[in-house]
Structures are given as structure tokens and as C-alpha cells.
Image (spheres, grey):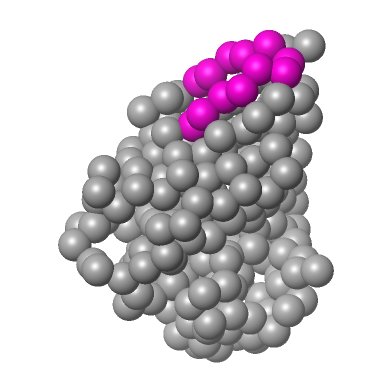
Amino acid sequence: DVKVTQSSRYLVKRTGEKVFLECVQDMDHENMFWYRQDPGLGLRLIYFSYDVKMKEKGDIPEGYSVSREKKERFSLILESASTNQTSMYLCASSSSDIYQPQHFGDGTRLSIL
Amino acid sequence: AQKVTQAQTEISVVEKEDVTLDCVYETRDTTYYLFWYKQPPSGELVFLIRRNSFDEQNEISGRYSWNFQKSTSSFNFTITASQVVDSAVYFCALRNNAGNMLTFGGGTRLMVKP
């Protein structure tokens, strides 16, 4: 079974802090994704990566950056956290085979005070 | 641009009732893929089904069934004889043939009461 692991289930940070959310997958997947989930809006894509050191902006990249130094790890960075970034963050991975689904982690519920 | 609409934000049923979750999509592509995911209270999205645009056969898996109709751009999900364990948020999603990005609907929260 594919396992996508997010480093924290719950995180509380303060406005202006630099925040790192970590995600690791164990299936050697090429693609990795970061989404945020807000009530009524579903999941919105922040960034994705299709290879090491490669990244592409999703629908809502403003205020975020990402890092992929190793194939199994994809980090989401909030450079200067703001209260409107309080949300549930979900990481996903998939192989390069477009028939295959994305596999998701348990999510990190981030609160910015 | 792609769009997925799940008009039902919340549905509440009593155990053993049948329930249908609606999904309507918009895309200009002729080849695309539709997905349903379940998100239980634990938070992890669990993949349920994938359907290709060129395969309009409906599918049944136990108590779950899916009705794909290209003519109405809909991909509805029916749970027969619902159970309390079916309580979750369900998401419909669309991916085009060009890449791996998914467009999600807003989700439907299903509450099954004993």
C-alpha cells in the first residue's frame, strides 16, 4: 500500500513565522502535490512537482513556496504566515501513469494566530 | 478551464436508506478522467473509483454504484443501504489528459444516522 506521511496532524503558529510542512511518500512516485482544503471550496492545488527540484504553480501559490530536494520528500513553506492561511493542508503523490489515482496523507490542520 | 460542481453540501439520511451524491463537471477536453474520493473524519482522502471519458459503463462495487452520463456531464455516486460508517465527506474530481492535476468539487458531507 502507498503511504503518504505528513509530519504533523495539528500545528499552531504565529503571524509572521516561517512555517514548514513536510510530506514523505514511500512508493517512489514521480509526482507530489500540496493542496489546501477549506469548507465549501473543496481542495485547491497550491503547488506540485513532477521530479526532483522541479515545481509548478497550482491555482493558489501566492504566499507559499515548495522544495523537493529528494524524490520522496516534498515540503511546503509559508514564508511569513498570515491568518488567512489557517486551513487544512493535504499532501498527495502519484506515479507518472495518468491512469493511476493520487494518494493522500492524513492532512495537517494549521492554525495561524 | 475545468470545473466540478457538487451542489449538495450536506446530506443527512437514516441508516439503510439509499443516497445519491451528485457530481456535474465541465471540460473542453474529449479525453478526461473522473474520480470519487471519500474523506472520513480521520482526514485522509481515500480513492474510490476512476472512470475514463471513453468508458460510459456504469460500475457497481458492493453497496456503491456510479452512474456516468456524458450527455449530461454527470458522474453520480449512489450508496445503497447506507451505514453509519459511510459518514464522510465525498469529493468528485476531474483530470484532463494533459497532466496529473486534479480539479475537485466542493465536497458533499454525508451523515448517516443510526
Q: How many labels does the image show?
A: 0
Q: Position of residue A6 (x, y in %)?
A: 71, 58
- Which residue is pictured at 63% across the width and 81% down the height? A29
Q: In this view, does A86 lie above or below B8?
A: below
Between A41 and B57, the one lying in front of the other is B57
Q: Quadrant of residue A104?
A: bottom right
Q: In this view, does A111 lie above or below A18?
A: above
- Which residue is pictured at 71% across the width and 70% down the height? A24
Q: Position of residue A22 (x, y in %)?
A: 66, 64
Q: Position of residue A27 (x, y in %)?
A: 73, 79
- Which residue is pictured at 63% across the width and 55% down the height? B47
Between B104 and A37, the one lying in front of the other is B104
Residue A15 visible? The answer is no
Per the rendered image, the range of residues in magenta is: B10-21
Q: In which quarter of the image is residue A68?
A: bottom right
The majority secondary structure of the magenta stretch comes to strand
- Which residue is pictured at 35% across the width and 44% down the height? B74
Between B59 and A78, the one lying in front of the other is B59
Q: Quadrant of residue B103?
A: bottom left
Left or right, residue A36 beside residue B15: left
Instruction: Specify the quadrant that holds the N terminus of chain B.
Output: bottom left
Q: Position of residue B67 (x, y in %)?
A: 46, 44
- Is A40 part of what is drawn in magenta? no
Left or right, residue A30 beside residue B33: right
Instruction: Specify the quadrant that holds the C terminus of chain B.
Output: top right
Residue A1 visible? The answer is yes
